[in-house]
Amino acid sequence: MSGGAYLDEQLRAALTDAVKTVVLEKPADAKAMMAGLLLQSAGTSLSGCTLTYFPLSGRGEATRIALHFAGIDFIDSRIYAEWGDFKPTTPWGSMPTLTLKDGTVLGQGRAILRLAGKRAGLYPSDDVEACKVDNLLDALDDIFATISKVPKEERVENVKTGTIGSLFGKIEAFLALHGKGCAVGNSLTIADISVFAVFGAALGTIFDNMTYEMLDAYPTILAIRKAVASHPKVVEWFEKQKKQEYWSTMMGGGLPDKYKLFFAENL
C-alpha cells in the first residue's frame, strides 16, 4: 500500500471513530455527516474564511449556521454603512460573499450555502434528494421578493388569500410531500436550516405587518422551525450571538424604520 493510500485509510478510520456516537444517537444523519467530514479533508480548506453579509438573518444566516455545524473557524463580517463601497468589489453586486484565506471571493448566496452544507454533511449525496433540497432553497429565496411587492397595509389579507399565502402554502405542501421528519427525507439538511432562517428574517424583522403568528396555518413549517431552533448546534450558535451588538435587531427586537426599506431592497 502506498503512503498516500495508507494516510487515506488512517483518515477514514479516524473519522469513523469520531462519528460513532452520532451513528448511535442519530443514524439517519450519520452518512451525510461522514460525507461532509471527508469533503473537509479532501477539498480546498475553508478554515479562516470570511463570510460577509448584513447584520441580520436574511440570506446569510443559514450559511453562518452551516459553517458552525461544520466546525469551520470563520470570520463573521457584518456590514451596513460600508455596503455602498463594498458592493462594486463583489463578484455579482450582492451579498453574502465568502472570501477564502487565499483571497478567492465567492458570491451567490445559495451556492455558498451549498458549499457550507456539503462541508457540514448537511447536503444530500443522492442527486434526486439534492435536487429536492435545491427546489426548496429556490422557493424560499422567492419569499423576500414576494412580500416586497405587496403594500404593507395589504399584507395581512394577502397572507390569507394572495401571493404571499400562495407561496407559503406551496412550501408547506412541498415539506409535507417530501419530508419524513425533516424538510427533505429524514436527515437534517440546509433545507431545514433555510426554512428556519428565511422565515425568521421575513416575519417580525424587516417587513411591516408580517408576524410569526401567520405561520399558525402552516404546521409543517412551524414544526421544522422548532426542530432546528432546538438543535444543540443551533442553540450553541445563538448563545454566541447573544453577546453581539446586532443581536436584538437580527431577532426582531425593533428594526428602525429608516433601515427597513434598505434591507428589504438589498437582501
Image (cartoon, helix red, strand yellow):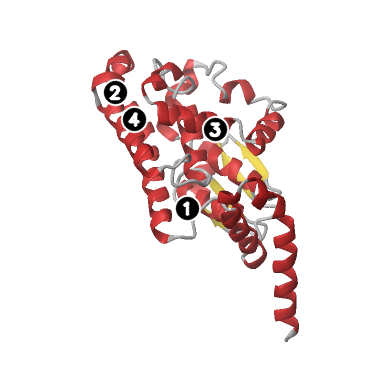
Q: The residue tagged with tag 1: helix, strand or loop?
A: helix
> Measuring 34% from the left and 41% from the top, which residue is drawn there?
177
The reply to whether discs 4 and 3 touch (Cβ–Cβ < 8 Å) is: no
Residue 229, image quadrant: top right
User: Residue 168, which numbered label?
Assistant: 4
Q: Is residue 182 left or right of residue 16?
A: left
CA gap, disc 1 to disc 2? 28 Å
CA gap, disc 4 to disc 1? 23 Å
Q: Nearer the viewer, mark 4 or mark 1?
A: 4
Check disc 1 and give the amino acid type.
Answer: Ala
On the image, the x and y values in percent for residue 19 come to 69, 54
Residue 237 shows up from this direction: yes
> Measuring 72% from the left and 80% from the top, which residue is drawn there?
4
User: In front: 212, or 142?
Assistant: 212
The residue that label 2 is drawn on is 150
> Measuring 70% from the left and 74% from the top, which residue is drawn there?
8
On the image, the x and y values in percent for residue 90 come to 51, 49
